[in-house]
Image (cartoon, coloured by chain):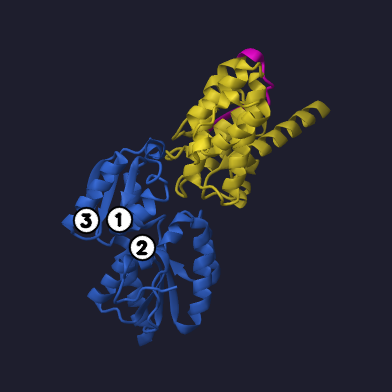
Chain colours: A blue, B yellow
Amino acid sequence: MTTATAETTDLDILRDAGLDASGKGRILLLACGALAREILDLKAANGWDHLDLHCLPAILHNTPEKITPSVREAVTARRADYDRVYVLYGDCGTGGALAASCAEMGVEMLEGPHCYSFFEGNAAFAARDEMTAFYLTDFLVRQFDAFVWEPLGLDRHPELRDIYFAHYETLVYQAQTDDPALTETARDCAKRLGLRFERRFTGYGDLARSLEAWSALATEDRKS
Amino acid sequence: MSEQEDDLILSDLPDEELVPQMHDDLYDGLKEEIEEGVNILLKRGWEPYKVLTEALVAGMTIVGRDFRDGILFVPEVLLAANAMKGGMAILKPLLAETGAPRMGKMVIGTVKGDIHDIGKNLVSMMMEGAGFEVVDLGINNAVESYLEAIEREQPDILGMSALLTTTMPYMKVVIDTLKEQGIRDDYIVLVGGAPLNEEFGRAIGADAYCRDAAVAVDTAKELVARRHNQRAAS
């Protein structure tokens, strides 16, 4: 299966096939395909050439039980080629299984239950305690049909919408970037789901902070 | 669908063809056809309990099996459940009148902070279909809500559901409170929800983790029967 490259982060490919590591850099970031653009952006902005990125297909999120074995397989297959491996997933519906697996393999992973939490900042997100909010990130706005509309069968059975979203009130678009066109798409997603719309700019939140810390640690390792 | 199937008149079918047709209609999520089928069988003198078990529950069991085997997915199961709900709405008052067998009583709800009730609703419906009386507490239940309900209803079973990794630990809060109050063993505690597993169920002190509605029904029947046997023996 074709995978994306750092030069061509095609969203459909990130969704279904992921992104292949370039083989450059001593630190491997093993990430969800939904984070590829953001991580590549941070890498480029900060000149983190010692961090190499490999992404698993983002669509794994629709079958969370497959995330842990897929991450485990990828870490096992690639770790010998790097000094250190970091896993860039939240718990992502694995019920603690991914954290347990990473601990067993001796690799660090991002903190937080999911990307909505670490984009906003885990502490701030937890403090909000928003039970009736449905979240979308930049990636999910772009991939709304593939990740939300179609898997829920709303393309075939729109009458199911009010069963799925009966207790939701607001669609919160967590914006990683300022993109008016994307905001309009998100607003339209809210309309399609029958929810109020709210846009919150989060930037990269704890994702950026974790990468900064890991990058700095790698630099120290090299000096010592 | 062929033109012939479009023209199918349910009332023309004999019982032995109507019931399998209702299974198909349930599988396809055809609510109006299910309601029509239920009414036809009742008019033909079927006991409400027989309609429930042979036409609806048996059909929904096929749906549940194919969901488990990855042939059907959540949207199709929801449509089927909605169709069954239509049939149940007709049968429910009649079941109460005709004294259908009672398997036991369950109090069920999603835990505090969790508004996802699709799984819980499926379990409620299938438990009712299996002859359990179900008291549905709805969504976002704090420990006080569960305690008040079990005090009031005196159920055999307490069921808790959670979809989120962040809310599922609350099940342990409820079970620990039952233990503190010395009433844990008065109830069978069943837990379920997408991120849970058997290990989690054991770790928090539940009697069982149920991976889907069909398993919940089978587990509930088994544990209620076991409890009755234990009580009879003591």
In the foreground, A47 or B193 = B193
Q: Cα distance, mark 3 to mark 2? A: 16 Å
Same chain for mark 2 and mark 1? The answer is: yes
Query: Which percent across, then down, holds residue A217?
Result: 36, 77
Q: Amino acid at mark 1?
A: Thr
Q: Which residue is mark 1?
A: A137
The label nearer to you, 1 versus 3, is 3
Q: Which residue is mark 3?
A: A182
Q: Are marks 2 and 1 in contact (CB under 8 Å)?
A: yes
Residue B103 falls within the magenta-colored stretch = yes
Which chain's residue wears label 3? Answer: A
Q: Decide: few, some or many residues near mark 1? Use Cα within 10 Å; few <14, some 14-19, many ≥20.
A: many
Q: Are marks 1 and 3 in contact (CB under 8 Å)?
A: no
Q: Residue at x 40, y 44 (%)?
A: A156
Q: Which residue is mark 2?
A: A34
Q: Is residue B78 above or below residue A210?
A: above
Query: Which percent across, then down, holds residue B145?
Result: 49, 29
